[in-house]
Image: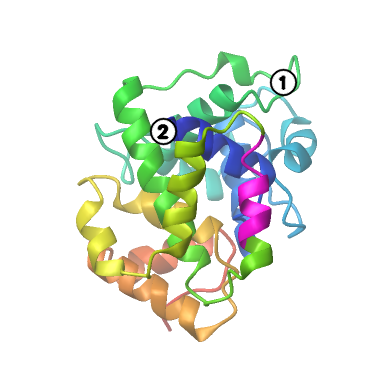
Amino acid sequence: MDAMKILGSLLNSGALSKGSGSNILGSVLGSVLGGSGQQRGGSGGGIGDLLGGLLGGGGSSPSSTGGMADILGGLLGGGGSGGSSAGGLGDIIGAAMKQFGAAPPGMGLTDIEPNIEPEQANEQATIMIRAMILAAKADGRVDDEEQRHIIEGLGEDITPEEVAFVQDELAAPVDVDAFVRSVPRGLEAQVYLASLMAIDLDTNPEAQYLHQLAQGMGLKPDEVNQLHEQLQVPKLYS
């Protein structure tokens, strides 16, 4: 199973990014691609809707933008406070987008190389896919139509095995404890960020899900609130 391809497909279609989550996806892509790091509106679109605005400034270093990029730098790049030798979310997203071929010519995505080995990247992509799908189910509203939209967003190159994996994850019960046990040490912040991409933080079940996820992974309330604040989404803790 090519989890990198699946993750790239899901990011491109935007099928798992809704509401505030689509804004976070925009911010993440901006930092990964060296764009402005500014959030786009919550249109729910995928990479195709976001690339133009995010890359319009071109070539500027994410670290030069300050604010949001300061905290995303560690989360996305595999270093700093949010990263580890296990690699960052930016490495995974960059490689997944390259694998999927979502970028138009000249956009620079072909220059993105992951800082992790292919097998490790595939394992981490699997974790990120599961994180996003679990978060999307947190409010209990992934109905048949939404599931069909997600499957259709996987594209024509998807294999029956890969479709079955996504379908199984969509059908599986929300078991946060079991998922937390599967998260490799050092990827906690990246997994939380991936989960935020798939959530429109406007219901109590979603807030409870994020609390359980953060608590299970050992993220402190002030760390979670700081992340939410920097990503310009409502804080989880008062």
**Residue 186 location (% of width, % of height):** 24, 45
Quadrant for residue 125, please give it: top left
Q: Is residue 165 above or below residue 32?
A: below
Real-space Cα separation, disc 2 to disc 1, in angstroms = 20 Å
Tell me the residue that label 1 is attached to: 107
Residue 33 in sight: yes
Q: Residue at x 63, y 67 (%)?
A: 144
**Residue 83 location (% of width, % of height):** 32, 40
What amino acid is found at the position of numbered circle 2 in the picture?
A: Gly
Nearer-the-camera pick, 147 or 233: 147
Query: What kind of element bears circle 2?
Result: helix
Q: Residue at x 61, y 41 (%)?
A: 154
Nearer-the-camera pick, 87 or 45: 45
Query: Relative to residue 69, is residue 152 drawn left or right?
Result: right
Q: Is residue 62 above or below residue 181?
A: above
Q: Callout 1: few (<14), some (14-19), or many (20+) C-alpha neighbours within 10 Å?
A: some
Q: Residue at x 58, y 29 (%)?
A: 97
**Residue 45 location (% of width, % of height):** 74, 50
Q: Residue at x 59, y 27 (%)?
A: 100
Tell me the residue that label 2 is attached to: 77
Q: Which residues are magenta?
A: 147-155
